[in-house]
Image (cartoon, rainbow, N blue to C red):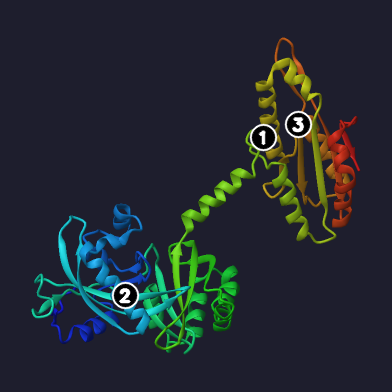
């Protein structure tokens, strides 16, 4: 709230005053669908406070999406008829009606609005003020408090409207207001370039810039694709975080101008939670190594960027007579052995190597350890030695593992080996402790 002198509203000047204030973002604003019942799509904080709620979350937790209940029941038919008439005639509306606030009190308000095509439906952009003297909407002067600009419903930190017809930035809210002040002009191309250079993570800039070109956005509209989104990393002085940019394309009924509404939302926590869940889904629940599917996927990704000439090594580890261990000592002891072997493998290879459990007692390690066959042979022998364990006291079970190693300097040779030999190696026990092919 600021201390500016309040505007005075009368019946004669209501439309012009509210339009003027709406242009300056100084009153309660909302966007309403013209359907039965109407639904509020966007609103600013002043609107929620006018209705007695702290914010959007407070209102929707109390009412759900049935926001039409804000309107006093006796006034609902008249208001809906006025909204429909504005859409039919493509003209502005002006109406006084009553709303019911959160605490149950009834307030008179005055609304002005204009129809606009939004995505696949027509909506009303409206400005609303409370009439202090109830029942005197057409005669008594009323004070209008000044509030913050309109914003879309939901959490966001940057909200911009681009006029694709004229090529300029129409409206900024949040961080973008600061951004536009840095520019010598209001051109979309300058705005996007400034955003990309100063706020978009380097690896995401090309995709971000291409996504927000006028040509791309207009092509979406022509193809009747009126919604699109892009996820990228946003940079501030404090951190780098993931952002979702939602784009809504619309055509103004009164001017035929095509506009793009950009809403930037912080999704970093959501994104990282999804990444953690994806990581959990790719891990073997017992050993925490990659499971079979994830092992194959990661090896495939590594091979796609491999340059011929380097050394590729594939270690295949199989625990000898593992069924006997389970039958003799029980499955808990078997699980403990698998966990212990997984720990040995982690300490024996680099973090950049891919280590996976591909079967009940079978493990696979993909490594780009650039060394001679002799060095790799010694590494396999040392690994085989470290996997020799003695478990239990009465009886004592000796645990050992068979290891096979495939070494290649050309990607297609390793792929050929995996295709032809891998099924055999995972179906039969290897007789030698170390067998380098």
Q: Which residue is mark 3?
A: 361
Q: Is residue 418 left or right of residue 54?
A: right
Q: CA distance from mark 3 to mark 1?
A: 14 Å
Disc with the residue nearer the chain's start (3 vs 1): 1
For label 2, the crowd category at 10 Å Cα-Cα, with few meaning under 14, some 14 to 19 and many 20 or more, is many
Disc with the residue nearer the chain's start (3 vs 2): 2
Disc with the residue nearer the chain's start (2 vs 1): 2
Query: In the rendered image, which quarter contains the N terminus?
Result: bottom left
Query: In the rendered image, which quarter contains the C terminus?
Result: top right
Q: Which residue is mark 2?
A: 83
Q: Nearer the viewer, mark 3 or mark 2?
A: 2
- Residue at 78% x, 50% y is 369
Q: Is residue 328 left or right of residue 141?
A: right
Q: CA distance from mark 3 to mark 2?
A: 69 Å
Q: Position of residue 170 (x, y in %)?
A: 40, 83
Secondary structure beneath disc 1? helix
- Residue at 84% x, 60% y is 308
Above/below status of 41 relative to 296: below
Figure quadrant of residue 147: bottom left
Figure quadrant of residue 29: bottom left
């Amino acid at each position: 709230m600021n201390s500016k002198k309040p505007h005075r509203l009368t019946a004669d000047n209501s439309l012009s005053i509210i339009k003027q204030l709406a242009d300056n973002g100084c009153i309660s604003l909302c966007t309403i669908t013209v359907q039965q019942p109407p639904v509020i799509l966007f609103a600013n904080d002043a609107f929620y406070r006018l209705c007695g709620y702290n914010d959007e979350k407070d209102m929707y937790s109390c009412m759900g999406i049935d926001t039409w209940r804000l309107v006093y029941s006796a006034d609902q038919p008249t208001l809906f008829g006025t909204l429909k008439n504005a859409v039919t005639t493509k003209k502005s509306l002006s109406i006084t009606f009553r709303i019911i606030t959160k605490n149950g009190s009834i307030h008179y308000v005055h609304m002005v609005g204009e129809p606009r095509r939004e995505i696949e439906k027509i909506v009303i952009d409206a400005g609303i003020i409370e009439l202090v003297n109830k029942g005197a909407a057409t005669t008594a002067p009323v004070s209008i408090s000044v509030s913050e600009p309109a914003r879309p419903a939901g959490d966001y930190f940057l909200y911009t409207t681009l006029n694709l017809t004229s090529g300029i930035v129409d409206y900024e809210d949040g961080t973008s207001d600061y951004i536009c002040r840095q520019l010598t002009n209001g051109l979309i191309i300058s705005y996007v370039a400034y955003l990309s250079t100063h706020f978009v993570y380097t690896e995401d800039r090309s995709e971000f810039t291409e996504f927000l070109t006028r040509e791309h956005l207009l092509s979406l509209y022509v193809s009747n694709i009126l919604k699109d989104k892009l996820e990228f990393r946003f940079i501030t002085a404090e951190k780098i975080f993931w952002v979702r940019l939602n784009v809504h394309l619309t055509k103004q009924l009164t001017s035929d101008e095509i506009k793009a509404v950009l809403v930037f939302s912080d999704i970093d926590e959501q994104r990282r939670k999804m990444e953690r869940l994806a990581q959990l889904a790719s891990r073997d629940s017992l050993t925490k190594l990659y499971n079979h599917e994830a092992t194959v996927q990661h090896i495939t990704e590594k091979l796609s960027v491999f340059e011929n000439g380097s050394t590729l090594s594939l270690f295949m580890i199989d625990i000898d007579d593992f069924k006997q261990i389970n039958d003799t000592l029980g499955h808990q002891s078997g699980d403990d052995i698998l966990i212990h072997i997984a720990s040995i493998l982690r300490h024996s290879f680099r973090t950049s190597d891919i280590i996976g459990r591909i079967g009940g007692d079978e493990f696979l390690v993909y490594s780009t350890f650039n060394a001679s066959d002799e060095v790799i042979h010694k590494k396999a022998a040392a690994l085989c030695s470290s996997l020799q364990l003695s478990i239990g006291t009465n009886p004592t079970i000796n645990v050992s593992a068979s290891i096979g190693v495939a070494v290649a300097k050309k990607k297609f040779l390793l792929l050929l080996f995996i295709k032809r030999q891998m099924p055999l190696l995972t179906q039969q026990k290897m007789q030698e402790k170390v067998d380098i092919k």
